[in-house]
Image: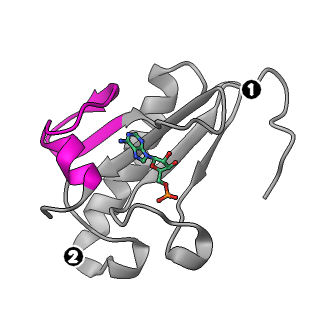
Amino acid sequence: MTDCIFCKIIKGEIPAKFVYQDELMVGFYDISPKAPVHVLVMPKKHLESLRSVNDGEKDLMGEVILTVHNVAKKLGIDKGGYKVVINNGEGAGQLVFHLHLHLLGGWNKSPGWQV
Ligand code: AMP
């Protein structure tokens, strides 16, 4: 999608600090981190949110979950524990309408907040 900031990052038109890339997925650091480690993992395919996912994306959704865990392992935050957040829609605080998973971790003990 031409006016999507994450599509522009994926295409290399806007810089980002990538931690992961393959044929289907990317992971890059959030520009405004809410945790010691805060990475956004997402499919390259432009889907606005979970609200626009359908049966045809079952494999892609499985892949994104495996990818977020692999990125957590790569960054060494899997053993201590990590959170994964997906905001869906403005009412949930979604700002960028390209489906993405927030991977949050790296706290020493507890993050101090629970959902
Ligand atoms: P959400 O509220 O779930 O849509 O999250 C969007 C996230 O994208 C926020 O945490 C922003 O800090 C982050 N963000 C916005 N622009 C950029 C950018 N250019 N590079 C990296 N992260 C960004």
User: Mark 2 belongs to which amino acid?
Assistant: Gly
Nearer the observer: mark 1 or 2; the answer is: 1
Query: How many numbered circles does the render carry?
Result: 2
Quadrant of the image for the N terminus?
bottom left
Q: Name the residue located 64 percent from the left edge and 39 percent from the top edge.
A: 34
Q: Nearer the viewer, residue 101 or 66?
A: 101
Q: Does residue 42 appear to the left or right of 40 in the view shown?
A: left
Question: Where does label 2 land, which residue?
Answer: 56
Disc 1: which residue: 107
Q: Earlier in the sequence, mark 1 or mark 2?
A: 2
Residue 95 or residue 46, whichever sits in front: 95
> Which residue corresponds to the image point at 33% horizontal and 80% vertical from the top-left?
52
Q: Name which residue type carries label 1.
A: Trp
Disc 1 crowd rating (10 Å Cα; few below 14, some 14-19, many 20+) is: some
Please tell me whether residue 20 is drawn above or below residue 88 in the rendered image.
above
In this rendering, is residue 56 above or below 23?
A: below
Residue, x 34% and y 25% (percent of image)?
Answer: 17
Query: In the image, is the residue at mark 1 within 8 Å of ligand 1 by its beta carbon?
Result: no
Secondary structure category for the residue under label 2: helix
Q: Residues within 10 Å of mark 2 (few under 14, many from 20)?
A: few
In percent of the image, x 18 and y 47: which residue is there? 8
Q: Magenta residues?
A: 5-27
* Contact (Cβ within 8 Å) of mark 1 with mark 2: no
Q: Where, by quadrant of the figure, is residue 28 drawn?
A: top left
Residue 33 location (% of width, % of height): 58, 35
Work out how far the residue at label 1 is from the one at label 2, CA to CA, in angstroms. Answer: 36 Å
Which of the image's four quarters has the C terminus?
A: bottom right
Q: Is residue 78 above or below residue 9?
A: above
38 drawn magenta: no
